[in-house]
Image (spheres, helix red, strand yellow):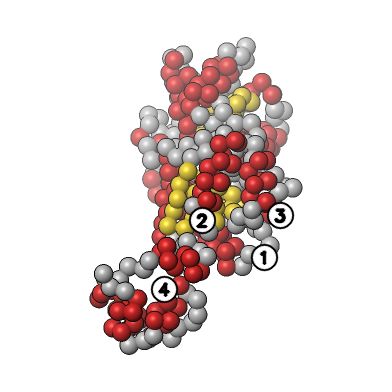
Amino acid sequence: MPTMADVARDAGVSVATVSHVLNDTRPVLPHTRQAVLDAIDRLGYTPNSLARSLVTARTRSIGLAVSAISNPYFTEILQGVEAGALEHGYSLLIADPHDDPEHERKVVQLLLERRVDGMIVAPSADPRALLAYLRRHHVPTVFLDRLVDDEAAPHFDQVCAASAEPTTRLVTHLTELGHRRIGLVAGRHGLSTTSERITGYRHGLAHAGLAHDERLIVHGDSESAGAERATAALLSLAAPPTALVTANNAMTIGALRALRERGLSVPDDIALCCFDDFAWADLFAPRLTAIAQPSREIGAQAVRVLLDRLAEPDRPARTVRLDCSFVHRTSCGCPDQLPNASKGTAS
C-alpha cells in the first residue's frame, strides 16, 4: 500500500507539502498541488483519515440528525446534505431522533462521541434538552427545516424554506376560486413549520376578507394516520369545509384516505391543495396542486453554512430561508395546465 512518503517521492516534493495538500493547512502553488494530486492518482494512495484526525483534531465528518428519513421530503434533503458533504471531502454519519426530545439528545451525543466536526439537525417540537447540550459542549450546529425559537436563534445557524407566504398563496388561490370555508390540516404542535403555516393560512383568509374559524384548523401531527383522523373530524362538522390545505406530504396521503373513506371526490366534492410536492404528486387523479420546497438545495445549503461556521467559529449566526414554488395542477378544481407553465414563485 503506497504511503505519503511514496507520494512525495513521485511528485518530487516533501512529505510536508503532501500533507498541506491533503489537509489544506497551508497554501500550495497550483502546479505543485496538481503534481501531488497526480501522484496520488497514479499510486492509488488513500489518506489515513484516522491518523489525520489525530493531528488536525478534525475528522472531516458531519453528523446529521433527521427524523422520518423515509419521508420523500427528508430523503431529498439527505441527498442534498450528502452531495454537499462529499463535494467538500466530508463523510456523513446519520441518526434518526424519531421526533422524540429525549432520544434526540441521545443520538446527538452519540454522533458527537464519534468526533464529528459539526452537526446538522432537524429539531423536535421540544428541543430544550438538545439546545442545552449543544451549548454546553460548544457544538457547531446548523438547524435544518425547523427553526428554534428567537431566544435560542442567536446561538445557531439555521436553514429552511419559507413557510408562511407559500401557505398564504395556497389559501388565496382557493379563495379566488370562490371557497369560503377552507380547512387546514396542520402539523405537530410546537414545530416552527406548523406555526408558520397556520400564520400563512390566517393571512390568506384575511387577505380575502374572511374571518378564520378555529374549528377549521385541525392537527394531523405531521403524519398520515394523524391527518386521516384530523380530516375525518373536519368532515364531521355541521358545516364542513369545501376545500382543504394539507401542511405536508404525509398528511396529504392521510387526508386523501379520509376523503376516499367517505366517498368524496377531489376536486368535484372538495378541493385540495398541499404543502410539499413529491415525485408521484403528478400521477394522482386529479394531479395535486402543491407548494414545492427546494429540499435538495436546503440540504446542500446547510452543509455550506456549517462549513462556514467551522472555518470562522466566531461569525454571527444567520438564518437562511429559501424560496418555494407554486405548482398549479388540478386538485384545486382548475383546468389542467401545460407542464412548462405549471410553476411560479410562491408569494
Give me the C-alpha separation between circle 1 and circle 2: 20 Å
Q: Amino acid at mark 4?
A: Leu
Going 59% across and 62% down the picture, which residue do you hit?
309
Q: Secondary structure at mark 3?
A: helix
Marks 2 and 3, the one that precedes in the sequence: 2
Q: Amino acid at mark 2?
A: Arg
Task: Tell me if label 4 and label 1 are in contact, CB under 8 Å.
Answer: no
Q: Secondary structure at mark 2?
A: loop
Marks 1 and 2, the one that precedes in the sequence: 2
Give me the C-alpha separation between circle 3 and circle 4: 34 Å
Q: Secondary structure at mark 4?
A: helix
Is residue 28 placed above or below 338 in the rendered structure?
below
Location of residue 187 in the rendering, given as x and y in whole percent from the top left corner: 58, 32
Residue highlighted by disc 1: 314
Pick the quarter of the image with the N terminus: bottom left
Give me the C-alpha separation between circle 4 and circle 1: 25 Å
Marks 4 and 1, the one that precedes in the sequence: 4
Q: Amino acid at mark 1?
A: Asp
Q: Which mark is residue 115?
A: 2
Residue highlighted by disc 3: 154
Residue highlighted by disc 4: 22
Asked whether residue 291 is in view, the answer is no
Going 31% across and 74% down the picture, which residue do you hit?
3
Q: Which mark is residue 190?
A: none
Marks 3 and 4, the one that precedes in the sequence: 4
Asked whether residue 280 is in view, the answer is yes
